[in-house]
């Protein structure tokens, strides 16, 4: 089932500015924080040196750039999440979609690689693997998509045949060609699945309730 929505609904459910969950996604973990702090420190040093080289003539703009760089670790998650949201907000048509889980399977993905020495002194490549759940969804129209997400214990409740809901995005008013699929919602378990939390969930659930009153 696909119910076309107004473009304003897309703007509300995928906001221009990052939500709290989107900010947390790009905050990620301690290693990400250290990386962002290093970028901030590097930026401060660069702009401080430029200010020292060019003297008082650039003192004001140098101070602004230095402060901005110093706070990169704080504002960068908002920036990158907003950029990602913008790529979805640019589509002209959005539809509320309801389908079924067709298949569920687990894969492993290489997150990063590092070199190390074995007992014989030879260099070996150590791969850091992350398990991911892949949820294949579809409907009677023939539409198919696979949603991936880092594997969590709660995902064990997902099974074939369960209803799923989400947003489909397109530049085709008839939705003959689907361009993007957001993260999905499984009503039975009140569970969200997706690599990135595109949807502002409180608004999505409000829209869902209103559509249920109309379409049952």
Image (cartoon, rainbow, N blue to C red):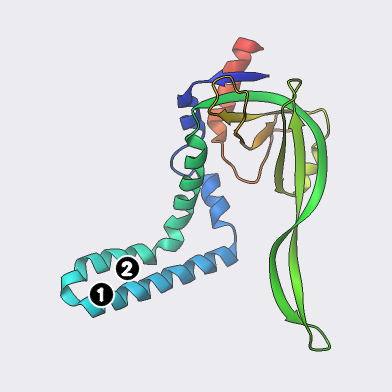
Q: Is 92 above or below relative to 183? A: above
Quickly name the residue at label 1.
51
Q: Is 134 above or below relative to 30? A: above
| Quadrant occupied by the C terminus | top right
| Extreme residue toward the left, this view | 57
Q: Which mark is residue 66?
A: 2
| Secondary structure category for the residue under label 1 | helix
Query: Between 55 and 214, which is closer to the camera in this rendering?
Result: 55
Indicate left or right for 4 with 162 as reference: left
- Where residue 159 sits, quadrant-wise, is top right
Query: Between 197 and 118, which is closer to the camera in this rendering?
Result: 118
Q: Earlier in the sequence, mark 1 or mark 2?
A: 1
| Secondary structure category for the residue under label 2 | helix
Q: Residues within 10 Å of mark 1 (few under 14, many from 20)?
A: many
Q: Is 116 above or below relative to 88? A: below
Q: Residue at x 44, y 42 (%)?
A: 17
Q: Is 138 above or below relative to 77? A: above
Q: Residue at x 50, y 48 (%)?
A: 81
Q: Are marks 1 and 2 in contact (CB under 8 Å)?
A: yes
Q: Residues within 10 Å of mark 2 (few under 14, many from 20)?
A: many
């Amino acid at each position: 089932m696909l119910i076309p929505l107004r473009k304003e609904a897309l703007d509300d459910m995928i906001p221009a500015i990052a939500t709290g969950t989107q900010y947390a996604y790009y905050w990620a973990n301690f290693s990400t924080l250290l990386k962002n702090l290093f970028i901030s420190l590097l930026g401060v040093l660069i702009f401080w040196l430029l200010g020292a080289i060019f003297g008082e003539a650039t003192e004001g703009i140098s101070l602004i750039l230095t402060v901005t760089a110093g706070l990169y670790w704080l504002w960068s998650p908002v920036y990158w999440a907003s950029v990602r949201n913008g790529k979805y907000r640019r589509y002209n048509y959005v539809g509320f979609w309801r389908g079924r889980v067709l298949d569920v399977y687990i894969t492993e993905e290489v997150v990063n690689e590092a070199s190390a020495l074995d007992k014989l002194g030879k260099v070996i490549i150590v791969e850091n693997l992350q398990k991911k759940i892949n949820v294949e969804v579809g409907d009677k129209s023939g539409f198919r998509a696979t949603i991936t997400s880092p594997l969590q214990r709660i995902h064990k409740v997902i099974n074939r045949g369960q209803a799923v809901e989400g947003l489909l995005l397109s530049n085709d008013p008839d939705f003959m060609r689907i361009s993007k699929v957001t993260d999905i919602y499984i009503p039975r378990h009140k569970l969200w699945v997706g690599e990135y939390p595109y949807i502002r969930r409180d608004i999505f659930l409000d829209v869902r309730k209103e559509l249920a009153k109309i379409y049952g």
